[in-house]
Amino acid sequence: MNRSALIIAVMLFVFQTFMVKLLAQVDMERNVDREPVVAGKFYEGDKNKLEAEVKEFLSPQSKSDYLEDIIALIVPHAGYVFSGKVAGMGYKAIDPDKEYKNVFVIGSSHYVWFEGASVYNRGDYLTPLGKVEVNKEIADDLIKSSKYFSFNPDAHSKEHSLEVQLPFLQVQLHKPFSIVPIVLGTQDPYVCRQLAKEMKKYFVPGNLFVISSDFSHYPDYNTAVKQDKVTADAIMSNDPEKLIKVVKEVKSMHDQNLLTPLCGWTSVLTLICMTRDDNNIEYKHLGYMNSGDVPYYGDKQRVVGYNAIAVVEKKSDEFTLTDKQKKLLLDVAHDELAKVVGAKSDVKLPSEDMLDKEVGAHAGAFVSLYNQGKLRGCIGQFIGDKSLWRTVREMTDASATRDTRFYPVSKDELDDIKIEISVLTPLKKIDDISEIKLGRDGIYIKKGYYSGTFLPQVATKTGWTLEEFLGHCARDKAHIGWNGWKDADIYTYRAIVFSD
């Protein structure tokens, strides 16, 4: 081997050795678990004592305390002796058996200021209760998605606002979960909006967002109570501009003791930027205290405020049915139709107790009968004054025998009859016909002793305009003339429509 080849070989060996060490160092840095830094200070450092401490803050619990479909919580992050009770008010609203795949734990930095937010993707988080796995795939995705996300080790090294949330999650959630730890260093509302834009795709059922923030800092007790309500109301309005206004107003106040209305305002603002256009969620207040309420430790001249607020999916007012329930109701209708025309029913129905269990809710219903695609009878009732299956049975009988537009259904027709059932939601009085959506809403027009209705599917099948839909109903069903709807009471309802 000549001199030049030897030098190249040595250089390659040195380079390869350096790269192996470098990659090993990078891998080591990549997998550095974040050790607890406030255990024994903000909360108990001993595992057994910590678990007992958190359980005490979470008790008592019952199923009636649980809120369905919690998507986010705003909870405090002070030492447990001060804010643990309010944090418990938030966490115990979560059903312990609810499965959350990922928990995004978000707080505003107390120690370093930087543009954007830092996502921990170098390892897992540790507490005296054990390891909390970090979803590094999501963490990496956020960092790649925007210049406003990065990994800043200084943002996590001393920050307590995320750490103090973890023991509550470890105790309250019985099913496995991962966390995405995010520390905001920004004070810029524009940046908060950009962060929210990137995180919005993860703001879905099955994920939980925990926003860590205390409220007013250092006013007297009475000032804190008033200011914290103003701030909580701004948050619960789901309006980012209202929250920004509250923060600005406090900064311009002459009371130097009130330093901030919300120390994690940028984190809370980011949450509201994700929820502001979502009509299917609502904010619920769960509890309030301030440090002046704490026995033996509370100083009422200089306090910090704590609120617990949940973001939940609104409960739908609409009636829903499973495929199994729909089939049962169709079976009930076919069984009744066979009996009405004097034929033997080949439908095997469960016991009345089982029917009451499966389709025993009270709801109005219409039953429509069709022969070769042509209407053969249709009668229903709006008010659900009995079990739904009983209403369907009665309306089947009425449609087959008492619809005065048709002769009663005969035994010879039985094999050709198709049944359509429309289960109705409660009537809702409207103030403007613009509230009616064709194909979605049925209408009920009432004027004095006269009334008439069209099911939602009538508009779909006829292709009528809104004015035609109203006009035909007023003239042909309510018998108050084509324009009679204009000075009548109009109600809407929706229907769950299913058929053979």
Image (spheres, grey):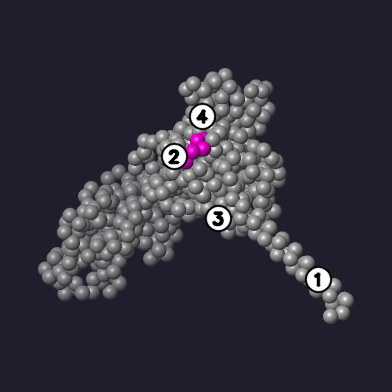
* Chain-order first, disc 2 or disc 1: 1
Residue farthest along the top direction in this orientation: 301
Tell me which segment is drawn in magenta: 43-47
Q: Residue at x 37, y 51 (%)?
A: 318
Q: CA distance from mark 3 to mark 1?
A: 42 Å
Q: Residue at x 41, y 35 (%)?
A: 56
Judged left or right of residue 333, residue 128 is: right
Q: Which residue is mark 1?
A: 10
User: Can residue 358 be seen?
Assistant: yes
Asked where in the image residue 464 lies, by quadrant, the reply is bottom left
* Chain-order first, disc 4 or disc 2: 2
- Residue 314, image x, y percentages: 43, 46
Pointer 3 and pointer 1: residues touching (CB < 8 Å)?
A: no
- Of marks 3 and 2, the one in the foreground: 2
* Chain-order first, disc 3 or disc 1: 1
- Asked if 156 appears above or below 102 in the picture, the reply is above
| Depth order, front residue of 208/487 | 208
Inspect the image, locate mark 4, and give the three-letter code of the amino acid beneath it: Phe
* Chain-order first, disc 3 or disc 4: 4
Number of the label disc, if any, that sits on residue 491? none
* Chain-order first, disc 3 or disc 2: 2
- Of marks 3 and 1, the one in the foreground: 1
Inspect the image, locate mark 1, and give the three-letter code of the amino acid beneath it: Val
Q: Which residue is mark 3?
A: 135
Q: Magenta includes 44?
A: yes
Q: Residue at x 11, y 68 (%)?
A: 342
Mark 3 surroundings: few (<14), some (14-19) or many (≥20) residues within 10 A: many
- Of marks 4 and 1, the one in the foreground: 1
Q: Which residue is mark 4?
A: 82
Q: Magenta includes 70?
A: no
Q: Which residue is mark 2?
A: 48
Residue farthest along the bottom direction in this orientation: 1
